[in-house]
Amino acid sequence: MDELAFYPATKLAQMIRAGEVSSTELLELYLSRIERLNSRINAVVTLDAERARSQARQADELQAKGKSLGPLHGVPVTIKDAFETAGLLTTCGSPRLKDYIPAVNAVAVQRYLDAGAVIFGKTNVPLFCADSQTYNDIFGITNNPWNVARTPGGSSGGAAAALAAGLTALELGSDIAGSIRIPACWTGVYGHKPSYGIIPQQGHIPPPPGTVSETDLNCVGPLARSAADLMLALDCLTGPAPADAMGWTLTLPQPRAASLREYRIAAWLDDKDILVDSRVKARLEAVIDALRATGATVDDQARPAFKTAAVCRTFQKMMYPALFGWIPTAMYETLEKMAQTGDEDSEMGRFARDVTQRHRQWLASDAERHKYQAKWAAFFKRFDVLLCPVASVPAIPHSITKDETALERTIEVNGHTAPYSLLQRWISLPTLAYLPATSAPVGRTEDGLPIGLQIIGPFLEDRTPIDFAARLADIIGGFEPPPGY
């Protein structure tokens, strides 16, 4: 049965409908694998086994009667511990929320349930989802199943690690600074950051529980083991928030092409302002060669009409206040003082100024954002997808110390020291402009670390990068289980 644990959710749903496997059998398979394997990686941090067993039995009874709960009927799934889940501990890694049990589900969680999914647990996150590594004082550190000395990324690190290790069938993540794409890239699974606004955020932490407003830049989206699963999850999740449903609906366009040869492809594999590890670049170049071998045309010189460094800086100016605008007053006042007296060229100095900026400064950045959106729209009149790295490096070693903030950390790229914030730069390009972006596994380094490709598509054309990822897997392969799982 263990091989079933790695089947795509789409395949599992088909098998349940055909009576080839029951929801109860799949749930027990995942629970048994968590009992045997989760201690290696610490991905699943909260279980709801008994309630899930009841839901699975109900799904099996309905299936036997020829009734369906939806496209995810009976499929066991876990949820990133940033989404409020009714009756189930939801902490977002914060000791302040260590006993928090919501009364209602986040909108996205409810949509998985409405599609028939069986939710049986929660997966680990960094404190308030604010890191590219996954660790917190409640549940500890999550390891990468490909190499436990390395991080699976963050903030959806537990989600990605659980999928890669075959501990769940499907996941629900969120992404403001690569929190879906980087973990997917570093663990060899698929992840999709949707166009901004097409999946409601209500019930996501941060901001604090009870907030009903939408956080700028942040997106809710799926992680999975196939591109087909991303498409299925997208269909389940997209649509207006309940308060808006009376006035508008959402119909996403079909993919722009029906074959790789028909896609107008641009590739951007390195940039003078964004260092790229030679191992990452070599693997992505091999992907471009494989595409060309099929007869596809790839333009590796085409670029949107903007300066990369300027986009990355505008992203920081908009991301930091969006992510940290809810911090306690005392912490905010400390940052205000730091913004006035700190080193203007330091990572910490820029962070303090960005979090405490005046509204007129934010408006100036928002005006720049709209200009970049127009430049992207012009670019996508000539091309259908843009291919680029997800992250500059493969999965990094754990680098967490109590006396060091994320802003003070560094990473190594081709023997050179680079700021930790380099991890945000490739993902910031589509995020700032609200564009959809899919992370697809495209192979591994010589020492076995997964490499991901970021496939950026036009605004509201989410089906295009996901479809491209599916077609790419046909020629280079897709998800592969890590050894030992």
Image (cartoon, rainbow, N blue to C red):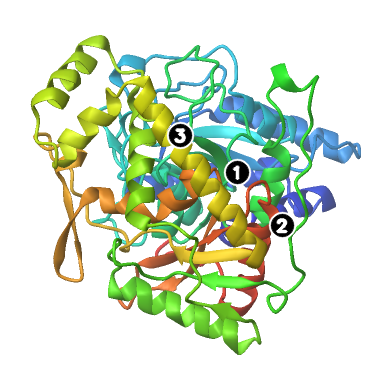
Would you place residue 430 above or below residue 104 in this image? below
Please give the residue where the numbered disc 2 appears in the rendered image: 11
Helix, strand or loop for disc 3: helix
Q: Nearer the viewer, residue 440 or 240?
A: 240
Q: Residue 334 lies in what quarter of the image?
A: top left
Disc 2 and disc 3 in contact, CB within 8 angstroms: no
The answer to whether residue 237 of the structure is visible from this angle is: yes
| Amino acid type assigned to the residue bearing label 1 in the image | Ser
The location of residue 340, given as percent across then percent down, is: 13, 23
Q: Considering only order in the chain, which callout, 1 or 2, is on the residue closer to the N terminus?
A: 2
Please give the residue where the numbered disc 3 appears in the rendered image: 366
Disc 2 and disc 1 in contact, CB within 8 angstroms: no
Q: Considering only order in the chain, which callout, 1 or 3, is on the residue closer to the N terminus?
A: 1
Front label number (2 vs 3): 3
CA distance separating discs 2 and 1: 26 Å
Q: Residue 449 lies in what quarter of the image?
A: bottom left
| Amino acid type assigned to the residue bearing label 2 in the image | Lys
The location of residue 96, given as percent across then percent down, is: 31, 15
- Which residue corresponds to the image point at 65% horizontal and 75% vertical from the top-left? 474
> How crowded is the residue under tag 3: few (<14 C-alpha within 10 Å), some, or many (20+)?
some
The location of residue 183, given as percent across then percent down, is: 41, 51
Disc 3 and disc 1 in contact, CB within 8 angstroms: no
> How crowded is the residue under tag 2: few (<14 C-alpha within 10 Å), some, or many (20+)?
some
Please give the residue where the numbered disc 1 appears in the rendered image: 195
Helix, strand or loop for disc 1: loop
- Which residue corresponds to the image point at 19% horizontal and 14% vertical from the top-left? 333
